[in-house]
Amino acid sequence: DAGVIQSPRHEVTEMGQEVTLRCKPISGHDYLFWYRQTMMRGLELLIYFNNNVPIDDSGMPEDRFSAKMPNASFSTLKIQPSEPRDSAVYFCASSLTGPNQPQHFGDGTRLSIL
Amino acid sequence: QKEVEQNSGPLSVPEGAIASLNCTYSDRGSQSFFWYRQYSGKSPELIMFIYSNGDKEDGRFTAQLNKASQYVSLLIRDSQPSDSATYLCAVRPSGGYNKLIFGAGTRLAVHP
């Protein structure tokens, strides 16, 4: 079975540019999560969706970040304008509903803002 | 106080020894507990989960849960150099939804 698919794997862009990260969850999963990981702050939950509806976006650092889930098989995380401090690895994860259901992670997008 | 706390390590153990990784959490109503392994430059991968007090074994791995003490641990028997990675403890808090709270991770180094 296909796992969580993220694209691109690597992104290098200049400060001020718009960045769009993409995620395809595991088919049938009704939860989707966006995380950011850095050495200093570890794994941070940014936002998560249930049945395509955003449930909690309190982890989104500021208005420059936005996320959408237009359908059950696709989500985007957008940064506009990007800043060097946004450089990190961004992970998408998905899960089924249930207290004992684990989250399954994609391979991540390594983002570098110059 | 952080919601999920782990010793950052590194925890260094010789090959063949038992590695013991510990995690404490603050939400007494937490429902279930997960251990993920993350190799450098890779994504977290699930090792096992536990939701009842006591021990749960899977191969060389044993998860232990003590809800009264708000403590969960992971034991790795017969540690191998390939076990060298960062181990993340994740806790599903009370209040519904499938959110996980992750600890900062413990880096394990198994030396030959």
Image: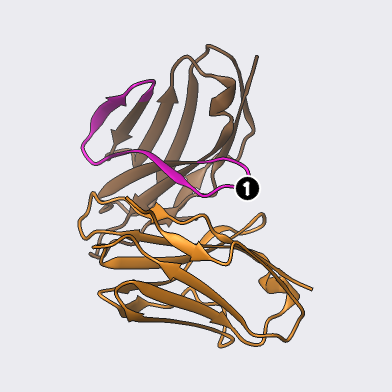
* Image position of B106 with respect to B111: above or below: below
Report the residue at 29% width, 74% height from top: A72
Q: Colour of chain B?
A: brown
* Outermost residue to the right: A114
Q: Residue flagged by tag 1: what amino acid is it?
A: Gly
Q: How many marks?
A: 1
Report the residue at 27% width, 28% height from top: B56
Q: How is the image coloured?
A: by chain
Q: Which chain is orange?
A: A
Residue B44: say if magenta: yes
Question: Residue B91: x, y in percent?
Answer: 36, 50
A33 or B13: nearer the viewer: A33
* Outermost residue to the front: A1
Question: Residue B26: x, y in percent?
Answer: 38, 52
Quadrant where the image shows the C terminus of chain A:
bottom right
Q: Quadrant of residue A50?
A: bottom left
Residue A23: say if magenta: no
**Left/right of residue A64 with respect to residue A1 in the rendered view:** right
A55 or A113: nearer the viewer: A113
Report the residue at 42% width, 78% height from top: A57
SS type, badge 1: loop
Question: Residue B36: x, y in percent?
Answer: 44, 42
What stretch of residues is rendered in magenta? B38-61
* Image position of B101 with respect to A63: above or below: above
* Outermost residue to the top: B16
Q: Give the residue at mark 1.
A: B41
Give me the chain letter of mark 1. Answer: B
Report the residue at 65% width, 14% height from top: B112
Question: Residue B65: x, y in percent?
Answer: 30, 34
Q: Quadrant of residue B52?
A: top left
* Image position of B82 with respect to B26: above or below: above
Mark 1 is surrounded, within 10 Å at the Cα level, by few (under 14), some (14 to 19) or many (20 or more) other residues, namely few
